[in-house]
Amino acid sequence: MDAASRPPSLAGLRRTYQGEPLLEADLAAEPVAQFATWFSDALDSGLPEPNAMVLATASAGGRPSARTVLLKGYSTQGFVFYTNYESRKGRDLAENARACLLFPWHPIRRQVRVEGSVVRLSREETAAYFHSRPYGSRIGAWASRQSAVVASREDLDARYEELAARWPEDPPVPDFWGGFRVVPQEVEFWQGQTDRMHDRLRYRRSGGGWVLERLAP
């Protein structure tokens, strides 16, 4: 095998992290307020799509699955995203209503991880968001049987064109599509530091409040 065809040495792929210390005294009293501060920092940094997050689910039998979705809202009630209820993640959540979110903000040496139970949004909340989407995205929600096998790209495009002709202006909200809210039970804030001595501070729900704990890196 010549040098050009050799795979890269993964052992040598590493970066040195260096950030401001993350101290307990510097954090907000509850995790959503702290998330709002860090999300604002991610926006100000110019990070592309800071609302992109990895969503991990598991089936009733424990088979895990992960994918990237977009955060579309957050509050003290939880973190919101939208999807096809018949997709793999939708089916997982119907069987096992728990999930984990990960915001991988690597360029600013930060991560946020959220674990919690998952509930569906009301149809009113879903409709309000659906009608705020661009027209093409609304037709796309109808056209795609998300996670199902598709015979060809041509079939998918034909389905889109058929639905666009049916609803040239204002498609209704699909009954198989809507929002989920991840209600946090744990929220961890990770700040990269030198020599892999990273800061990890976790909020854990306890009774009606939150306990803040430091985790070893």
Image: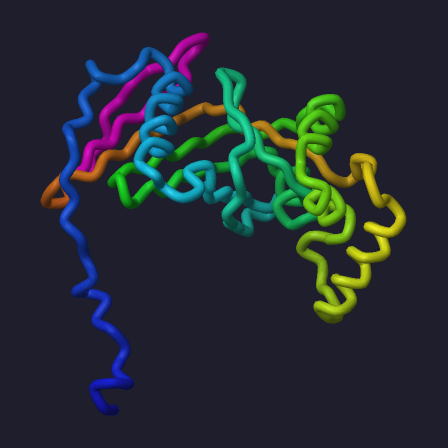
User: Where does the image place residue 10, in percent across and percent down from the top left?
Assistant: 23, 66
Name the image colouring.
rainbow
Q: Is residue 85 visible?
A: no
Residue at the spot 25% in from the left edge and 40% down from the top edge = 109
Please give left or right for residue 52 compared with residue 201 in the image: right
Residue at the spot 72% in from the left edge and 42% down from the top edge = 135
Residue at the spot 74% in from the left edge and 28% down from the top edge = 127
User: Where does the image place residue 24, in percent across and percent down from the top left?
Assistant: 21, 18
Q: Quadrant of the N terminus?
A: bottom left
Please give left or right for residue 186 compared with residue 166 in the image: left
Prevailing SS of the magenta stretch:
strand
Q: Which residue appears farthest toward the left when viewing the image?
A: 195
Please give left or right for residue 107 compared with residue 84 in the image: left
Q: Is residue 215 visible?
A: yes
Establish if 137 lies above or below 120: below
User: Where does the image place residue 44, in percent across and percent down from the top left?
Assistant: 33, 31
Q: How many marks?
A: 0
- Part of the protein shown in magenta: 198-217
User: Where does the image place residue 158, in percent across and percent down from the top left?
Assistant: 80, 63
Establish if 88 lies above or below 50: below
6 or 134: nearer the eye? Answer: 134
Q: Which residue appears farthest toward the top when viewing the image?
A: 208
Q: Quadrant of the C terminus?
A: top left
Q: Which residue appears farthest toward the right when viewing the image?
A: 166
Residue at the spot 67% in from the left edge and 31% down from the top edge = 132
Q: Is residue 216 magenta?
A: yes
Task: Give the quarter of the image for residue 147.
Answer: bottom right
Task: Give the quarter of the image for residue 201.
Answer: top left
Q: Which residue appears farthest toward the front when viewing the image?
A: 169
Please give left or right for residue 55 compared with residue 204 in the image: right
